[in-house]
Amino acid sequence: MSNITISNKQTIYYELIDGDKSKPYLIFLHEGLGCVAMYKNFHNHLCAKTNCPGLAYDRAGYGKSSPLIRNRTVNYLHEYALNELPELIDAIIPDKPFILIGHSDGGSISLIYGSERPDYLKGVVTAAAHVFVDQMTIDGIIKANAAFAAGKLSGLFKLHGEKTDSIFKAWSSTWLSDWFKHWNIEYLLPSVNVPLLVIQGKDDQYGAIAQVNSIVSKSSGKAEQLLIDGCGHSPHQDAPELVIDAISEFIDRLEKAEE
């Protein structure tokens, strides 16, 4: 457990997980209201199962990292993907192969980063990623707003402390804004040329299955999909063993293809 100060003077909290250094690192990218602590032991269990080393971190504004320093723009996910993430990789695990494991916002960030075709990226796993704004997303966030206002999401304060109000409002107000409703990253999917595993719960309250279909059909890399029955927006929490097994098998196939 460590902290690093990046070029914009913000401090980023991160954890390194032991594993076989000859294997690719698994880089965990959390959801839009998440942080490393929200994974509980999922990231440790996946690294143990695959024997891969891991890197998990709290993006700026979240968890144990620095608060947000400005209002979000339509490009906030691009900023996390193309500024913060590569800076952390270069500083913490330079010149090491890696696989991105991204949940929700973290999945979208993984796809944006993957579209740059970085040299050491070996594959991408997304869970509940968005590539456009759909009505299910809007409806889900409206319900989350009501729950937050009623004090039903108080657990977030244990994760983000005094940053909770600002990060929740940044998330909800951005996705519900008129200026964000046309946000769409489908145009960059053909540039993602590494293998993908695209996971989504069939009962995801924040995204339609059309998100999965778009990622799988438009990406240039070989893309597999996994749709999970009885599973909501957090497959790694709702069906952890199934998800860990699926990702482990995906990584095995990547490693065999490299031989």
Image: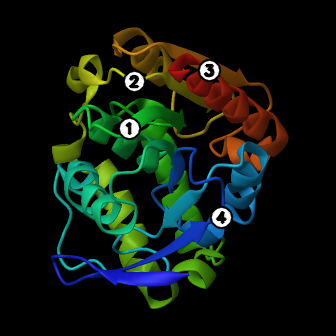
Looking at the rendering, which quadrant does residue 247 occupy? Answer: top right
Query: Which amino acid type is marked by label 3?
Result: Lys
Looking at the rendering, which quadrant does residue 119 occupy? Answer: top left
- The residues bearing labels 1 and 2 have C-alpha atoms spaced at a distance of 8 Å
Q: Would you say the residues marked 1 and 2 are in contact, meaning their CB atoms lie under 8 Å apart? A: yes
Q: Is residue 201 visible?
A: no
* Residue wearing tag 1: 121
Q: Which corner quadrant holds the C terminus?
A: top right
The disc placed on residue 135 is: none
* Residue wearing tag 2: 194
| Circle nearer the viewer, 3 or 2 | 3
Q: Which corner quadrant holds the N terminus?
A: bottom right
Query: Which amino acid type is marked by label 4?
Result: Asp
Q: Earlier in the sequence, mark 4 or mark 3?
A: 4
Dot 1: element: strand
- The residues bearing labels 2 and 4 have C-alpha atoms spaced at a distance of 25 Å
